[in-house]
Image (tube, grey):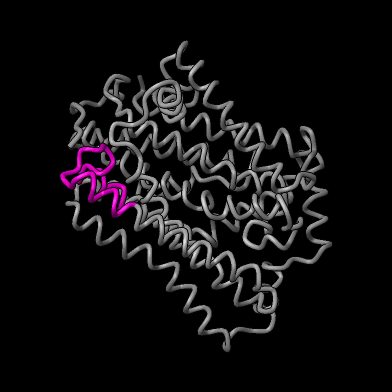
Amino acid sequence: MYLASVTHAPLPTPERHQRLDQLRGLAVLGILPVNILLFSGPFAALANPMVWGELRGPNAVAWWLTRLLFEQKFLTLFCILFGAGLVMQRLHLGPGPDAWRVHRRRMAFLFVLGLVHAYAIWYGDILAPYAICGLLLWPATRWPAVRLWSLGLMLLTVPSIINWLAWFSLSGWSGAALEALERSWQPHLADLLTEIAAYRGDWFSQLRERVPQALYLQLQLFPLASGWRLLGSMLLGMAAMRTDLLTGAASLSGRTLRTGAWVLAGLGLALTAWGGQELLVAGKSPIRAALLSGQPLYWGSLAMAWAYLLLFPRQGFGGWAGISLACVGRTALSNYLLQSLLCTGIFYGTGLAMFGQLQRWQLLLMALTLGAGQLIVSRLWLSAFERGPLEQLWRRLSYRA
């Protein structure tokens, strides 16, 4: 297993693992084609694509490509890598109360930054939830891999269990609750136009929409669904780190890992495609769609994320692309926030006010273009500086160095 020396100083750049940095860079770039849909259009349109815009011709192709290859896949991969990072921090810092204090400061910085991000810039923040999970999982960094695998898989089943329990208990729901669920899936046109006008307006108009959306994600979706997924995926990432799956030094043969990866990829694509097809014909039963349509995507994305991880070259990529991808990974926090600043500058009223105006195929091309730009900018930045700007601040506050 890859081990860093036990110290309470930050991990020196030469000790970083190239494959992990490249995977982290891939994850950061891979979440943008999905996030850009939330930056650029109504919140409800991600789960229900029939809410806003058409799904014909190039738009249908863009939706299927995003659904099959990106949606929830790279977010899951990022969770896995975050869990692996917790194990690396534990190995690097060693035992004792000083390690816990450093970790608390790291997570506190991430949590505060996430709250600022969620309420001042964009409601879809992942930093604050990651910080909460990181605090909860610190004791688990010392667990054996078998326990991590077992608990991680168990936690991943919780959102599905909750959804199915909700489905089977529908007969006990009040009429108002059923109406609210249906309206969340298919908002009224007036609600959509209000959201669009707000995000095309000034910062305070945006705030009136952003606050309830952020509160919903943090206080409702996190405890009922996304939190379990984050915790489960992070635990699996910790287990993968302990068994060397992430560093490319696992004891299993390359052929075994590739075979397993292709099986997972096929399963993930099949589930995602099936779920997508069911979603497109779900208009006749909006309540069923709201509760159950995401389940094939949920499990398919978990399988696809692991397929991406296992199919990634064991030594990473070489050449310009590999070095640039690693640079994005080394500046992952800065790049994640940069995506938010660029996209809100393009789509919100405090910038170009293009919210709700672009089609899906245009958004996919824009996401890929911005990602290519981040490859270039990250490499240029690290040719002049040792760390990204937010990474440097995070280091100073966490280690007080």
Q: In the picture, residue 16 is in which quadrant?
A: top left
In this rendering, is residue 42 above or below 159? above
> In which quadrant will I find the C terminus?
top left
Q: Position of residue 4 (x, y in %)?
A: 21, 28
With 252 as the anchor, is 394 left or right in this view? right
Q: Nearer the viewer, residue 120 or 350?
A: 350
Question: Which span of residues is magenta-colored?
Answer: 236-261
Q: In the picture, residue 86 is in which quadrant?
A: top left
Q: Verify whether residue 248 appears in magenta.
A: yes
Who's the residue at 62% across and 47% down the image? 123
Q: In the picture, residue 232 is in which quadrant?
A: bottom left
Who's the residue at 36% across and 51% down the image? 306
Q: Position of residue 69 (x, y in %)?
A: 51, 50
Q: Position of residue 327 (x, y in %)?
A: 44, 24
In this rendering, is residue 171 above or below 237? below
Q: Position of residue 135 (x, y in %)?
A: 35, 46
Who's the residue at 50% across and 84% down the image? 168
Say whether residue 223 is visible: no
Q: Residue furthest top?
A: 384
With 217 as the anchor, is 176 left or right in this view? right
Say whether residue 72 is visible: yes
Q: Nearer the viewer, residue 195 or 242?
A: 242
Q: Verify whether residue 188 appears in magenta.
A: no
With 215 as the anchor, is 283 left or right in this view? right
> In which quadrant will I find the N terminus?
top left
Who's the residue at 77% across and 32% down the image? 351
Q: How many marks?
A: 0
